[in-house]
């Protein structure tokens, strides 16, 4: 033992880090008593906040072990989750950029009145009132049959879209408050787009039951598309809301065509409605 200690001393003398000018490199940094207490307090507060956020036990209780798989689930989300979040971010960003008529000071402010009028042409109240008026003025059985089925399709579209909007409760890209006409048609949320769904359903219905020239058919398709896009320009809906509205409108049209009411059933419904109005008068 004395021989080994004697051999270690020359090594310590020859070590460069043992020189006086390098002694500070070998020693741990010194802390003042106040800093040490502050560090302990910060560490304790971090530990307490971590336990409270994780719902862990209180001080003095047994601590539950945290498995590595839990950290992996938080730090490494699935590929589907990453793709969905990326698509939602792109959807929100593009929708906000396209909302040029969302405010009176936007870049599309001069076109705001025209875009608003275009969006108003797809409002549910206008189509329901117009269908009722045409049904009241119609004198043919074939016309009344088409109008009654169109009225039922409009009611189906209103109720389905309103129910889905209440269930999802998605706000628009600019989070604008709904207007008076939106409250009447129960179009208070963003997903799905009610105007887009109604425009596609009405255009498909008219194209299927009316004999129109080719230019008019093209204009009807163009109108349905512009009604949906106008709501994006006004900052009311996202692009995904309008796309889902288009798909929902086509689904409503297919459903109404599959359960089409014949002329006798339509006449029965008209007679019931007329009897109710005469009793009220």
Image: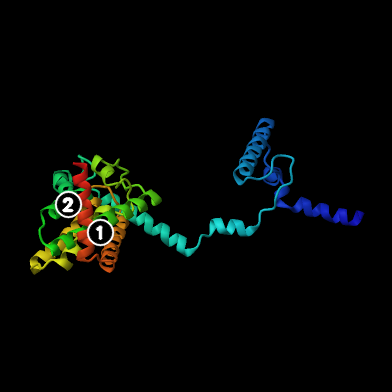
| Label placed on residue 132 | 2
The N terminus lies in quadrant: bottom right
**269 left or right of 51 in image:** left
Q: Residue at x 91, y 54 (%)?
A: 2
Pick whichever, 265 or 35, lies toward us. 265
Crowding at mark 1 (Cα within 10 Å: few <14, some 14-19, many 20+): many
Q: Quadrant of the C terminus?
A: top left
For the image shown, how many numbered marks are present on the structure? 2
**Which of 231 and 98 lies nearest the eye of the viewer?**
231
Which residue lies under the disc numbered 1? 153
Residue 4 place in picture, x, y as percent: 88, 57
Secondary structure at badge 1 equals helix
Residue 221's x, y, as percent? 17, 63
Q: Nearer the viewer, residue 143 or 155?
A: 143
**Percent x, y for residue 231?**
24, 51
Front tag of 1 and 2: 2
Colour pattern: rainbow
- Under circle 2, the secondary element is helix
């Amino acid at each position: 033992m004395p021989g080994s200690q004697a051999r270690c001393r020359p090594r310590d003398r020859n070590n460069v880090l043992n020189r006086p000018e390098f002694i500070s490199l070998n020693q741990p940094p010194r802390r003042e008593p106040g800093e040490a207490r502050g560090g302990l307090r910060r560490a304790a507060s971090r530990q307490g906040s971590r336990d409270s956020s994780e719902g862990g036990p209180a001080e003095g209780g047994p601590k539950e072990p945290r498995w590595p798989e839990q950290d992996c689930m938080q730090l490494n989300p699935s590929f589907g989750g990453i793709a969905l979040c990326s698509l939602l971010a792109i959807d929100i960003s593009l929708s906000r950029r396209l909302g040029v008529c969302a405010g009176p000071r936007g870049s599309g402010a001069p076109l705001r009145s025209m875009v608003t009028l275009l969006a108003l042409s797809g409002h549910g109240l206008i189509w329901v009132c117009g269908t009722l008026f045409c049904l009241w003025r119609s004198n043919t059985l074939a016309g009344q049959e088409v109008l009654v089925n169109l009225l039922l399709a409009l009611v189906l579209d209103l109720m389905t879209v309103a129910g889905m909007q209440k269930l999802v409760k998605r706000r628009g890209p600019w989070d604008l408050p709904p207007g008076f006409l939106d409250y009447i048609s129960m179009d208070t949320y963003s997903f799905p787009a009610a105007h887009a769904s109604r425009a596609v359903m009405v255009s498909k219905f008219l194209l299927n039951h009316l004999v129109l020239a080719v230019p008019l058919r093209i204009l009807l398709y163009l109108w349905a598309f512009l009604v949906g896009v106008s709501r994006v320009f006004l900052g009311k809906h996202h692009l995904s809301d309008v796309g889902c509205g288009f798909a929902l409108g086509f689904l409503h049209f297919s459903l109404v065509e599959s359960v089409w009411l014949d002329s006798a059933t339509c006449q029965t419904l008209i007679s019931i409605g007329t009897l109710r109005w005469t009793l009220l008068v």
